[in-house]
Amino acid sequence: MESNWPILSVLIWLPIIGGLVVVAVGEQRAAMARLLALAVSGLTFVLSISLFTAFDTSTAAMQFTEVKPWIETFDIYYNLGVDGFSVPLILLTTFFGVLVVIAGWESIQQKVNQYMASFLIMEGLMVGVFSALDAMLFYVFFEAMLIPMFLVIGMWGGPRKVYATIKFFLYTFLGSVFMLVGLIYLYIQSGTWSILEWHQFPLTLEVQKWLFLGFLAAFSVKIPMWPVHTWLPDAHVEAPTGGSVVLAAIMLKIGGYGFIRFSLPVTPDASAALDWLIIALSLIAVVYIGFVALVQQDMKKLIAYSSISHMGFVTLGMFIAFAVFQNTESGRGAALGVEGAMVQMISHGFVSGALFLCVGVLYDRLHSRMIADYGGVANTMPWFAALAVLFFMANSGLPGTSGFVGEFMVILAAFQANFWYAFLAAVTLILGAAYSLWLVKRVIFGEVANNDVANLEDINAREAFVLGTLAVAVLLVGLWPAPLVDLMHASVDSLLQHIQQPKFVLAGG
């Protein structure tokens, strides 16, 4: 559907231009920078709701499309559009855009204008990634969003921030280089940068496998999958609270989105041939990283490892479809897996974002992330304790919270593929409960551990608003996931029909 006004361009450029204006305000006028950043992010979120309300759920076609020539010599177009996969992720991005500004209201005192601007520019670039239909445009947005994140960790991070930023940049950049080679190859072969045309372009199985591995290199680092996950705990620990929230809530999802937009539709036969590799890496992430999370002493590190384990569900849900097709006639199980993966992405955004904000609240008061420095927080901060326990329960997959819905759907799909897949995936629910509840027991419950905890003040109205909003989101998706699933249903069915058609036959293979 063509919209009358370019809503996607507005959602991309409004925060970017807003960010540049916030920088121009200057360091001296911090209060003005905060208000301006809040106004821009709030307006972007309000405008993004129109994507949801005006979205036609009956079709898998791209909607709100915009096409303008950009670099005509190389056939590169400014081509935007969204479907059932992109809309929930754009809404998640704009939603967190507002919360991150509010969360950093008091805790950031140095270079406030630059901090707020970094997040606004990052928000615009991430919306660009989710709505680009031109591969080169996608790549530009994909790489550009590294820069504000690099600055956020490098300028407002902890004591080892330089090490963390360089590791984050090198890992993500190295992965992207392989993707760029793949994109250029596809352009040379097909004569276009259009992602939708690539979905139909015939390729031999050999070529598909190489392309698949190129995409895997880029997207597995982003998610991150085991064994290229080691940058994430470092980045999280050193990043300021806002940086951790955006990193966990949105940036990791770009990897999952890449698989849905590139790996599965462009190289379906290679995805079917190498699905065992992704399933194996996902299950290792789900189980092994769960055990790694169990022994962490730093709260941020524990939540970071928990993120890697939960994102293993996402990749498992996406690639389990091929095994389900082999075992059953109907593709319902496969649809359940992909929809579960998408719900898990959105849910993980809410839950992990909320958990990092909870750690941020404690850190602002005691300036420590170590579990050993806390104990009995519930006695002095009852409201905070209630919300934190809800989020940790959601993290362990409690029914009624969003954390349960996606994981349950993926486990149901896994049963139709292979019993052992489902068994190993279900182990994580036990491990998730173990490390989440173990942390709650040590930090929140019990006797007041020391004088520092005894002097803690409960959350103020600003913190209560941020955490309360996320609590509503977690319960809403947990109790009523239907609007979210309906949004992506047509797109999921279209993707599954597409990946069942071999491409290499057309290529003469």
Image (cartoon, rainbow, N blue to C red):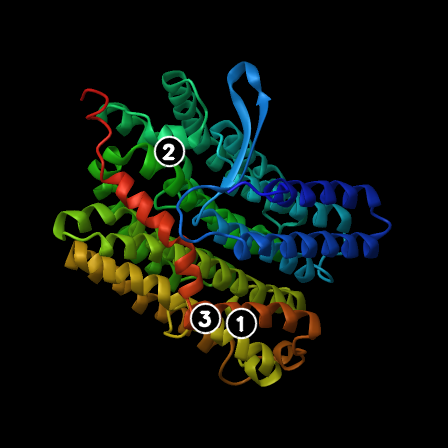
Amino acid at the residue labelled 2: Phe
Q: CA distance from mark 3 to mark 2?
A: 33 Å
Q: Position of residue 20 (x, y in %)?
A: 75, 40
**In the depicted view, which residue is nearer to us: 131 or 457?**
131
Q: Residue at x 54, y 40 (%)?
A: 2
Amino acid at the residue labelled 3: Phe
When the figure is inspected, residue 446 is found, relative to residue 103, above or below; the finding is: below
Residue 472's tag is 1
Residue 264's tag is none
- Labels 3 and 2 touching (C-beta < 8 A): no
**In the depicted view, which residue is nearer to us: 483 or 432?**
483
Amino acid at the residue labelled 1: Val
Q: Quadrant of the C terminus?
A: top left
Q: CA distance from mark 3 to mark 1?
A: 15 Å
Crowdedness near tag 3: few (<14), some (14–19) or many (≥20) residues, C-alpha within 10 Å: many
When the figure is inspected, residue 244 is found, relative to residue 264, above or below; the finding is: below
Q: Position of residue 72 (x, y in %)?
A: 56, 17
Q: Residue at x 28, y 28 (%)?
A: 208
Label 3 vs 2, first from the N-terminus = 2
Identify the element where label 1 is drawn: helix
Q: Residue at x 58, y 56 (%)?
A: 49
What residue did someone put label 3 on?
A: 392
What residue did someone put label 2 on?
A: 215
In the visual, does 444 lie left or right of 337?
right
Report if residue 240 is visible in the image. no
**In the depicted view, which residue is nearer to us: 325 or 280?**
325
